């Protein structure tokens, strides 16, 4: 069956910080994609920014992306990531990524999921810079879910070209300021988690699906991020042609007052469930649990429907944290300022992955 004809939507481009790369404001997050024809069609339409990672789908995602984009390698900007904690692991991941993606170089290679400055050792930075000098990567990046701490650190270090940050309509104005400051420092800013929970990937049988589809919340969420001038591009996950077509609309239709109303209603719906990653709960759990990290991991399952990925990330937590059961506590010491039902959500994560 032939793919539908390419979309007539006019593509919007921005410059990715000091890299000078011209990127479509709508990129393609490949993490939850299993149908390579969706990736191929996105590239045919002209989307030029594709993001994967060594750990996605137990390593199979890179292989699929490499096969889907191989013929267009010179026309696209290819990004991948490694969450390896040391030089040896980084080296192994980079060589595997190059092989699986069928390429001689990675355009942007991220140190992945670094949420504390202590996680970014000189050893990691030195290897990333060596890979850059060797031509195996063009630009050095870092991905984080804790922008408030990490973006000032990146700007001060001066060795990172690109930052991949969680950024969406649920976050407060301090996040806007952090993104703007990093962008003005020359760091190319890429937005992830732009749908505030990934509910986009709900199945039609899910009772929430109809509401989300009908009120246009996912499209409005994407338009909200594209409306932010300091974000060069975004990487929403897309699993089928319908989602690709809907996301393309975000480039053609600017964010409006009616979109704002939709998102206000959406925020009210998801507040009991969705962690906004403000990190205000850090250190609040009497058992020492990394609450924000665990809630984010749960989102991979409940939002993106990526149970294997979520369980894998959960099992990477400290063993003493994995053993904790929130039901054993008389009362929860964590009170989310944004209304997340923390103890309920944590108990669900423990039930699913523990």
Image: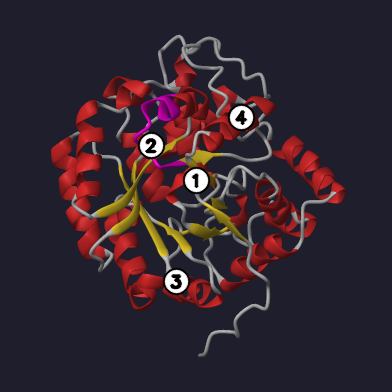
The answer for how far apart the CA atoms under marks 4 and 2 are is 18 Å
Say above or below: 138 vs 102: above
In the rendered image, is residue 348 in sight? yes
Residue hosting label 2: 113
Question: In this rendering, which labeled residue sits more in front, label 1 or label 4?
Answer: 1
Question: In this rendering, which labeled residue sits more in front, label 4 or label 2?
Answer: 4
Secondary structure at badge 2 equals loop
Rate crowding at label 4 as few (under 14), some (14 to 19) or many (20 or more) other CA atoms within 10 Å: some
The answer for how far apart the CA atoms under marks 2 and 3 are is 25 Å
Residue hosting label 4: 175
Say which label, 1 or 4, has the lower sequence index.
1
Residue hosting label 1: 17
Q: Is residue 161 magenta?
A: yes
Residues tagged 3 and 4 counted as in contact (Cβ below 8 A): no
Say which label, 3 or 4, has the lower sequence index.
3
Q: Residue at x 81, y 44 (%)?
A: 260
Where residue 11 appears, x then y in whole percent? 63, 67
Rate crowding at label 3 as few (under 14), some (14 to 19) or many (20 or more) other CA atoms within 10 Å: some
Rate crowding at label 2 as few (under 14), some (14 to 19) or many (20 or more) other CA atoms within 10 Å: some
**Residue stretch in magenta:** 153-163
In the rendered image, is residue 202 in sight? no
* Quadrant of residue 175 within the rendered picture: top right
The answer for how far apart the CA atoms under marks 2 and 1 are is 21 Å
């Amino acid at each position: 069956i032939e793919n539908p004809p390419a979309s007539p939507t006019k593509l919007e481009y921005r410059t990715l910080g000091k890299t000078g790369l011209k990127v479509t404001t709508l990129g393609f997050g490949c993490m939850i994609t299993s149908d390579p024809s969706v990736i191929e069609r996105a590239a045919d339409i002209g989307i030029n920014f594709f993001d994967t990672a060594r750990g996605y789908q137990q390593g199979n995602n890179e292989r699929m992306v490499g096969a889907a984009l191989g013929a267009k390698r010179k026309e696209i900007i290819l990004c991948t990531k490694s969450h390896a904690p040391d030089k040896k692991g980084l080296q192994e991941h980079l060589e595997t990524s190059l092989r699986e993606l069928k390429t001689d170089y990675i355009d942007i290679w991220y140190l992945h999921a670094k949420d504390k400055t202590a996680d970014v050792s000189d050893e990691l930075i030195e290897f990333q810079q060596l890979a850059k000098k060797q031509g195996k990567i063009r630009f050095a990046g870092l991905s984080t879910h804790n922008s408030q701490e990490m973006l000032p650190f990146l700007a001060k270090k001066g060795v990172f070209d690109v930052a991949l940050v969680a950024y969406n309509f649920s976050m407060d104005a301090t996040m806007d300021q952090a993104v703007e400051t990093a962008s003005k420092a020359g760091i190319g800013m890429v937005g992830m988690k732009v749908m505030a929970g990934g509910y986009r990937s709900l199945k039609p049988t899910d009772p929430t699906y109809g509401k989300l589809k009908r009120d246009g919340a996912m499209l409005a969420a994407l338009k909200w991020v594209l409306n932010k001038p300091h974000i060069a591009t975004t990487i929403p996950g897309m699993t089928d042609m319908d989602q690709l077509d809907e996301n393309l609309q975000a480039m053609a239709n600017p964010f409006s007052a009616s979109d704002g109303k939709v998102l206000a209603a959406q925020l009210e719906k998801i507040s009991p469930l969705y962690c906004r990653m403000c990190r205000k709960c850090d250190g609040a759990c009497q058992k020492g649990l990394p609450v924000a990290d665990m809630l984010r991991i749960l989102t991979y399952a409940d939002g993106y429907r990526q149970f294997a990925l979520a369980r894998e990330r959960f099992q990477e937590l400290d063993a003493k944290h994995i053993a904790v059961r929130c039901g054993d506590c008389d009362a929860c010491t964590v009170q989310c300022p944004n209304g997340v039902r923390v103890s309920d959500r944590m108990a669900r994560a423990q039930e699913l992955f523990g």
